[in-house]
Amino acid sequence: MRYAATREPGPPDVLNIGQTQVPRPRRGEVLIRVAYAGVNRPDCLQRAGGYPPPPDASPIIGLEVAGTVAALGDGVEEWRAGDTVCALTPGGGYAEYCTTPAAHCLPVPRGLSLLDAASLPENYFTVWHNVFERGALREGETLLVHGGSSGIGLTAIQLAKTFGASVITTVGSADKAAYCRGIGADHALNYREQDFEAEVAKITAKRGVDVVLDMVGGDYIEKNLKCLALEGRLVFIGFQRGSRAEVDWRFIMIKRQTITGSTMRASPHERKAGIAKALRERVWPLFEEGRLKPVVYRVFPLEEAAAAHTLMESSQHIGKIMLAVRPE
């Protein structure tokens, strides 16, 4: 099979097309003939040498796919060869075939294409677990999500609004702010022109927000704590500006705040299976009702994975960047 190979850790141009054997599904796994794969920031980190795959995962980049089940490992009963699925993968997505646990697969929502479906798993698994399970966002509360025009950001905005929360988001341009408001954000702040801490205080009459979803870190960390209301929850899913900061930890005591976070790839198999079950029951029907929508910004052929990574690292996109592997 063809796959996107890396000659060595480095910039996007280390990606090229290689040939390797089709993997065999282990017990509890399925083999997927990949039509499309999503591009995510962890993919760029892995390419650069900063995010090695787990010991039992494929070394090939790629954390989400959609396609057709080609073969079943022992013990798999919930899928059949020929089923169309989208899936969270531990790796291996930038290839014509990849394996993943059967419990991490989901059906393609009715009315969505394989391209649309491939754009969902990484973002929806991540947001559901971090915002609704770890962050415990509830109806009537307010969410602050950074990077609102990213795949994660747009997912968080849509899900939070659908489940009855208010949303404030930060973005880097007027166009991105307009897009986020159009998809449901109550307030979109341009961090290049506005101090989000001061703006959140104005918007909430100094009450603060109930949950912050942050992938920025660095100097945002203390500002996030200041933005939180009493009993607020700060959830980390990344550290684009670094994982260290000087913080006045009194905010946690005074406001009874909670700090948590997770990395999806390293989460236990059972946790990811539970998230898949929750998504199938509570979120996938919302796509079929037209209350949620995928946002695909651009599709590159597998041979142009380097260009896809260059675009991802430029942060000029709105929504998902995708790879066409074997379009059906």
Image (tube, rainbow, N blue to C red):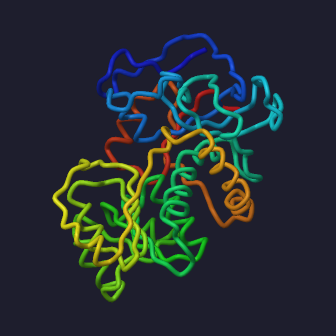
Give the farthest residue toward the bottom. 205
Which of these two is toward me, 63 or 90? 90
Q: Nearer the viewer, residue 307 or 243?
A: 243
Toward the left, the furthest residue is 246
Q: Residue at x 20, y 59 (%)?
A: 219
Q: Is residue 255 left or right of residue 105?
A: left
Say which quadrant the C terminus sits in: top right
The residue depicted at 48 percent of the width and 38 percent of the height is: 266
> Which residue is rendered at x = 60% and y = 44% of the image?
272
Q: Quadrant of residue 288?
A: bottom right
Q: x, y percentage for residue 164? A: 58, 77
Q: 29 above or below 202?
A: above
Q: Is residue 64 left or right of residue 262?
A: right
Residue 149 x/y as whole percent:
42, 58
Q: Residue at x 31, y 49 (%)?
A: 239
Q: Is residue 85 left or right of residue 38?
A: right
On screen, residue 260 above or below 309: below
Task: Kindly indicate the quadrant of the structure image that contains residue 209.
Answer: bottom left
Image coords of residue 231 (percent x, y): 40, 76
The residue lying furthest to the front in this view is: 253
Quarter of the picture containing the N terminus is: top right
Please provide percent x and percent y for residue 308. 42, 35
* Number of numbered labels in the structure image: 0
Foreground of the two, 256 or 291:
256
